[in-house]
Amino acid sequence: MAAYGERIYEGKAKILYKTSRGTLVHFFKDFATAFNAQKKQEFEGKGAANLKISSMIFEYLKRTGIRVHFLKLIDERSFESEALTMLPVEVVVRNILAGSLAKRLQEKEGLPLHPPLVEFYYKSDEKGDPLVSDDILIALYKQSPADLKTLKEMALKTNEALKKLFDRAGLILADFKLEFGKTASGEIILADEVSPDTCRLWDKVSGEKLDKDRFRFDLGDLMTGYRQVCARVEAALKEVA
């Protein structure tokens, strides 16, 4: 991987390299993890599938006017992006009651949420990425109120664009996680990835889960779901090209 540049970070799903141009290369790994990496397994082709899905979605979001870090594909496992100062906040948008929220509220999964719910989580593997309020982020973690307002606005705008795309692909976007960073000029833009690793995606007709919940809860072959999402998104984008 030396050709990518200097290796600067390795996470659960990606490895980051810094190029001589000051940009970043994101290498997508084949590992799936769940429950704060307590469950882990390698799936051949997962990295390539998530890379293709993320790159297609980033190009689509750019066309809708949403600023993203994605610059270009490098190969079937990596893309190049702008280098950002990442904000320590994971933004989760929920259109349907599912996952940890359904468990937390002891409510039945599948109930629609109107309007969509936006939640903030403090990004820290050591702390388990805890759910936090705006006030906690401001008072304890020194985040800017203006930045948090921007994150919520961008998350909701991204949600509307993604719901339209996934609806064309025959998928329900139940919820998803976003990460953001700041450019050298201080502009907040969308970063990380948008894939079945970070989105709950359900078939519109059958309700079959085609995302990482297949791995979390042993609901079926992970790659069968990811390949379906990839093919459907690609076909949906051709319809609107």
Image (tube, grey):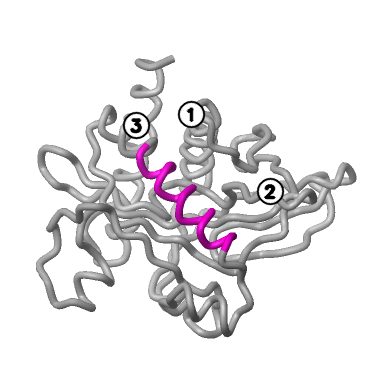
Label 1 is placed on what type of residue?
A: Thr
Who comes first in sequence, dot 1 or dot 2? 1
Q: What residue do we see at 23% from left, 78% from top?
A: 104
Looking at the picture, how far across and down is residue 39, in whole percent? 40, 73
Q: Label 1 to label 2, Cα distance in Å?
A: 18 Å
Q: What residue do we see at 37% from left, 38% from top?
A: 162
| The magenta segment | 146-160
The residue beneath circle 3 is: 165
Q: How many marks?
A: 3
Within 10 Å of disc 3 (Cα), the crowding (few <14, some 14-19, many 20+) is many
**Left or right of residue 150: residue 20:** right
Label 3 is placed on what type of residue?
A: Leu
| In magenta segment, residue 229 | no
Q: Residue 187: which disc?
A: 2
> Is 120 located above or below residue 43 in the figure?
below
Q: What residue do we see at 59% from left, 60% from top?
A: 147
Within 10 Å of disc 2 (Cα), the crowding (few <14, some 14-19, many 20+) is few
The residue beneath circle 1 is: 64
Answer whether labels 1 and 3 touch (C-beta < 8 Å): no
Q: Residue 120: which disc?
A: none
Looking at the picture, how far across and down is residue 15, in whole percent? 66, 57
Outermost residue toward the front in this view = 146
